[in-house]
Image (cartoon, helix red, strand yellow):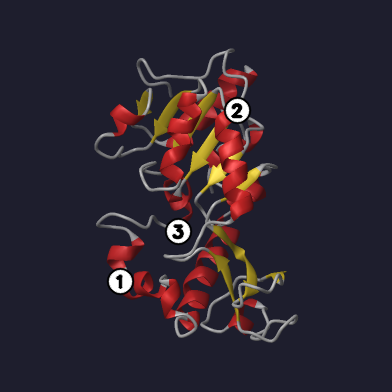
Amino acid sequence: MTGPGRFSPGPEHREIVFLTGSGLSARTGLGTFRGPDGLWALEPETEQAMHADLLPGSLPQLWRVWGRMARIAGEHGPTPGHRAIARLDAPVITQNIDGLHQAAGSEVVAELHGSALFAVCLDGRCTWRGTLTPGDGSRSEDHAVPADCPACGAPTRPDVVLFDEELPRDALDLALRLAERAELFVAVGTSGVVFPAAQLAPVAAAHGATTVLIDVAPPPGARALFDHVIAEDAHEVLPDWERRIHRVGGTSFLDPFV
């Protein structure tokens, strides 16, 4: 479906870069975080556990929350939006921790908030990082992760960025480089107004990019921040973009979300 007057990429947009947030993954059942129906409002005890200064006491809640989210993502798999982005071979800057871009086939992914599919050592000086198997439960062992770091013996934790923690420097540097080289910068399922991610669209615009927001419920003021705002479902818009760019008619067999 093509909305009347809806923006779509042109031949001048050879380098498309996406910034994605929880709205893109909500269709898996993960939900979003902010707003009256978001996780922080519905589960205030979860929001409280996201503060870094509550560690290590909040570890059981962190394992339960992020392990469950990783499990849901793994069970439901990528959405049509994730798949369309991957088929466009576009680099991604994501605020999501679910690994769905990589599962869809995206190769360049800057994970600003870490990944719930990995565990790290609670001691920031230790470089140990291990893959986990998402499950249910409040212990690291419930997710196939040792309780104590194999390298130094400190407790282990999900590799996600908590409130009051710095974003991974490598991911942020990559995000800035991608924004600077974009010819079309597209924010999907994110307000785009929370720093430091909020600086990326202006950076892209300053380097000559066209900026677009796709969100079924764009936040107030979005039209002043982006060249184009598409208030539609990204799972319809992005597959349509992909078909137009690749000149494929009809509906791809990969588009339906089961």
Q: Residue at x 41, y 42 (%)?
A: 198
Mark linked to residue 183: none
Q: Earlier in the sequence, mark 3 or mark 1?
A: 3
Q: Residue at x 32, y 70 (%)?
A: 43
Q: Is residue 107 above or below residue 202?
A: below
Count of numbered tags = 3
Residue to which mark 2 is pinned: 181
* Number of the front mark, 2 or 1: 2
> Hey, what amino acid is under mark 2?
Arg
Percent across and percent down for residue 87 are: 65, 33
Q: Is residue 238 above or below residue 105?
A: above
> Hey, what amino acid is under mark 3?
Leu
Mark linked to residue 30: 3
CA separation, marks 2 and 1? Answer: 39 Å
Q: Residue at x 29, y 28 (%)?
A: 224
Q: Earlier in the sequence, mark 2 or mark 1?
A: 1
Percent across and percent down for residue 157 are: 58, 76
Q: Earlier in the sequence, mark 3 or mark 2?
A: 3
> Hey, what amino acid is under mark 1?
Pro
Circle 3/circle 1 CB separation < 8 Å: no
Percent across and percent down for residue 82 are: 56, 42
19 vs 171, nearest the viewer: 171
Q: Answer few, some or many: residues within 10 Å of disc 2's Cα (few below 14, many 20 plus, some between 14 and 19).
A: some
Q: Is residue 113 above or below residue 24?
A: below
Visible in this render: residue 48? yes
Residue 124: name its quadrant.
bottom right
Q: Secondary structure at mark 1?
A: helix
Q: Answer few, some or many: residues within 10 Å of disc 3's Cα (few below 14, many 20 plus, some between 14 and 19).
A: many
Q: Is residue 232 left or right of residue 246?
A: left
Mark linked to residue 44: 1
